[in-house]
Image (cartoon, helix red, strand yellow):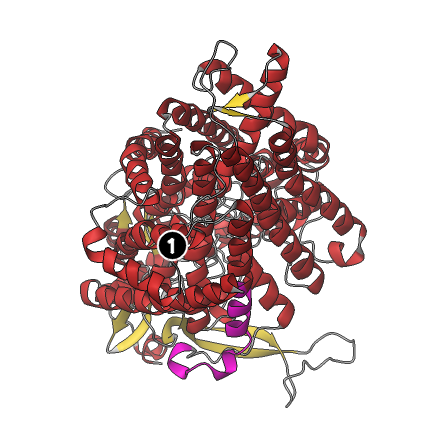
Amino acid sequence: MNANEVIQLFLYFGLLIGLTPPIGGFMARVFEGKRTLLSGILGPVEKWIYRLSGVKADEEMSWKRYFGAVLIFNVVGIIAVMALEMTQTWHPLTLNPQKFPNVPWALALNTAISFITNTNWQAYSGENTMSYLTQMAGLAVHNFLSAATGIAILVCFARGLKRATSKSLGSFWVDVTRTTLYVLLPFSVIVTIVLVSQGVVQNFKPYTDARLVEAYTTQVPKTDDRGQPVNGPDGKPVMVAQRVETQSIPSGPAASQIAIKQLGTNGGGFYGQNSAHPFENPTPFSNFVEMFGLIILAASLVYAFGTLVGDHRHAWVLFGVMLALLVGAFTLAWWAETRPNPVVGNVLPLLEGKEQRFGVMNSVLFGVATTGTSCGAVNSMHDSFTPLAGLAPLWNLMLGCIAFGGVGAGLYGIMMHVLIAVFIAGLMVGRTPEYLGKKVQAWEATWAVVAILIPNFLILIESAIACSAPAGLSSLNNQGPHGLSEIFYAYASCANNNGSAFAGLNANTNFYNLTLGATMFLGRFGVAFAVLAIAGGFAAKKTISVSQGTLPTNGLTFACVLFGVILIVAALTFFPAMCLGPIVEHGLMLAGRVF
Amino acid sequence: MKLFIQSIRQTILWTIIAGVAYPLVMTGFAQLLFHKQANGSLIERNGQIVGSELIAQQFTGDKYFWPRPSAGSYATVPSGASNLGPTSQALQSNVTANATAFRTGNKLAADAPVPADMVFTSASGLDPHISPESARLQVARVAATRGIAEEQVGALVEKFVEPPQWGILGEARVNVLELNLALDELQPKKAEGSVLVKG
């Protein structure tokens, strides 16, 4: 720990706390349909969008219809993205200058689901798989729309709390349109320009062939006329010397996509190495902007929620709990990642899978922030973190990415814990539990439990299947307990729509593409259904006034209960798995064992 | 059915706005305001593009500074990291091998500590930087190979040490490609060396 690192941390968390109220206030105005600074310019665009898409802005939806809109809109999106991916051969040459072939169906499906669900899990590297057209008109578009969908569901939930004896919960189309137009696009424009100034590329050029300063010779497998490797008499591929004189430097409209990738807590990199790639994250400042971008909208939403339900103190309690979870995970990870690793001869700092310009602290902070939110962008390889430092992001995922969560998704995720906390506390004092003036009854408690159990169930069951199926094990890059962590991380990441990875796992196989695809879909829309069901239940109820028996949800007591519920649920579910993965690996590492 | 039609129309509209208009406008601004950065921070020498400031190149010769080891052999399409875990045997042997190679190449003592950035592979596989410490340890070798005074090469290295951005953000570092290009300027290369430059 040195002074610079501490200053950067204060800067990061200080700005986070300082900018949350103004940005959150702005967002709340957008969600409430009020005029904002941008209404003058974007108002007419908004009206045109409604007209051209056949939407009446004042036509509200029931919770079931709202969910129907979410689901149908997203399934249409999956088909659109798959169509782009699987027709790359016919894309215009300017938008596919590297002439990438069509993406195979299993990978195309996995990628489409991944971007639609805000997961942005990637079983491919963008620079050798996706055409510019697929990236900009397919993947980037759904970086916006999946973020807007998450926020819309949260806004709908807030309406459910605010309204009384009502069936209608607003219009999904209006929520998506206003969120994208007034929040996501303007912030993305700013972040794009800042990123380009630091060196993130933004062009439509083919890759540049640079003449290497020092050409070199390398050994490559010999191939025959048909491009098949030639095997020698010993059965091994014949190697031939090849002179390498040029370096292909990738290009593309990267900055515009990276901006929304961070702000929308998407995390799907333009390039395979994501925010570790020098073209995606060239300087410490771009790194700061990206780390900040991935969390600020999610944090501001907590404040916006407070405005929407008319209780800012409650919002700050939620904010505090989230911040505590985040800082706790960061502290563990930073401590663990600055301890020597006897396996590699105690060399420090541990820079395997990290970039020199970021160093350890910024890599760990990024890693924790990207998993506390559901962003999933990475500026270092989590697979190479020491066991306990790798446990911190895994733990964040297992909590459900709720600190501060994916835009929308994180907050409605923690809401489920809030309801359980209120329910348990209510039962303890023998009163009907209430939350913000609404009775929490069997319907709400049931769906809250369902929402919490869906991802947890998916993680544990599917990891178990992957561990016992040859198709699951053959993808491992690391042996021993670390291999288990790789599998766990993959399912935890996908079930909670995060998308970061212990990237050693070769996920581009039919087994992983399909099981992880299904996991992402169920994790996203299963939870969304439960949240909207609760919103519908709340909206139909009367609002009751605060009485002596009401547990105040805006004080320290409630914060502690909530914190306890979150920890107990996650610990009871995942502690055995954690023991078999990172915790046992930590012990083995200290003993110098290798696999 | 109504939702289905609205979904299709909304998807088309947003594809036009966020998928076509937005990246095009951003490209326009980027090219206008930050032309060099938007095009990959390319470096030209004698009218020829020799690389990007941001992308590492492989250097193995004694007359150049060496970059960090790359798990993907400095391939750019795609690049890659090792993703080796902390208890990986492969990681252990790689670290030992990298340390030995660095010590031997720079004529360091067999038990001399080697900076971490030279034994661990980077996250991108294309990390353009090394630590100032790693650069300094290579000065003697480079100077001897080129027949230049160590002080002169050392001074050049110090010129290329970038402190944390604005004194606060990130870590101190040295850009290897830029340093090596400046090194070639320091002393015009002899006839047999120039082949590589001209290609």
- Which residue lies at the image location 33% right of the left edge and 39% below the top edge? A28
Kindly identify which residue carries mark 1. Answer: A260
- Which residue lies at the image location 66% right of the left edge and 55% below the top edge? A518
Q: Position of residue A55 (x, y in %)?
A: 39, 60
Looking at the rendered structure, the number of numbered marks drawn on it comes to 1
Q: Is residue B103 above or below residue A108?
A: above
Picture quadrant where residue A104 is located:
bottom right
Label 1 marks which chain's residue? A
Q: In this view, does A46 lie above or below A439?
A: below
Q: Residue lying furthest bottom in this view?
A: A225
**Residue nearer the viewer, A190 or A434:** A434
Q: Where is residue A511 in the image (x, y as percent from the top left)?
A: 71, 60
Q: Is residue A29 magenta?
A: no
The magenta region covers A76-95
Q: Can residue A155 be seen in this view?
A: yes
**Residue nearer the viewer, A162 or B24:** A162
Type of secondary structure dominating the magenta stretch: helix
- Which residue lies at the image location 51% right of the left edge and 55% below the top edge? A69
Q: In this view, does B173 lie above or below B72?
A: above
**Residue nearer the viewer, A351 or A433:** A433
Does A163 sit left or right of A7 as displayed?
right
Q: Residues within 10 Å of mark 1 (few under 14, many from 20)?
A: many
Q: Is residue A363 visible?
A: no
Q: Quadrant of the N terminus of chain A?
A: top left
Q: Is residue A88 magenta?
A: yes
**Residue nearer the viewer, B115 or A361:** A361
Q: Is residue A487 above or below residue A343?
A: below
Looking at the picture, which amino acid does disc 1 mark? Ile
Q: Where is residue B176 in the image (x, y as percent from the top left)?
A: 35, 57
Q: What element carries label 1?
A: helix
Does A363 sit left or right of A462 as displayed?
left
Q: Where is residue B56 in the image (x, y as percent from the top left)?
A: 40, 61
